Image (cartoon, rainbow, N blue to C red):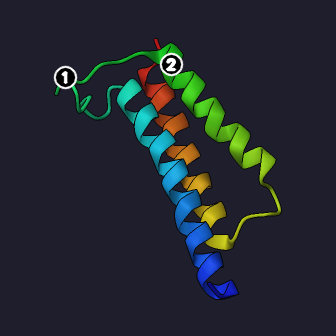
Amino acid sequence: MDTMENSENSENLFAALVYSLYMTAMQQLGAVANPMSGHKECDLIQAKISIEMIDMLAAKTVGHLSEYEADFIRKSIEQLHQLFDQASP
């Protein structure tokens, strides 16, 4: 695999990791249905942990992300924080 392919694969894997954590948080915020139950469920404690994991990942990777990766994680975090604030009592 050449450097260009490796870089693209790395970006795709990073985006998949962030997306997985993002969708978990979205389920925990009740924004999307749990695929197992088909119901929307809200668990703010678990959502906060998932969001903090994405925040930590962003902080630990500063300066090591492509523009696409940095933008993807930033937008994900912004949206999750906004939804968390809306869902919090």
User: Element type at marker 2?
Assistant: helix
- Judged left or right of residue 23, residue 75 is right
User: Element type at marker 1?
Assistant: loop
Give the numbered dot on residue 46. 2
> Mark 2 to mark 1: distance in Å?
17 Å
Dots 2 and 1: beta carbons under 8 Å? no
Give the numbered dot on residue 89. none
* Mark whose residue sits in front, 2 or 1: 1
**Residue at (53% x, 59% y) in the render:** 15
How packed is label 2: few (under 14 Cα within 10 Å), some, or many (20 or more)? some
Residue 13 drawn above or below residue 9: above
Residue at the extreme front of the image, as rendered: 1
Give the numbered dot on residue 37. 1
**Residue at (49% x, 55% y) in the render:** 16
**Quarter-of-image position of residue 28:** top left
Residue at the extreme right of the image, as rendered: 63
**Residue at (62% x, 64% y) in the render:** 69
Residue 14: image x %, image y %?
A: 59, 58
What is the three-letter code of the residue carrying label 1? Ser
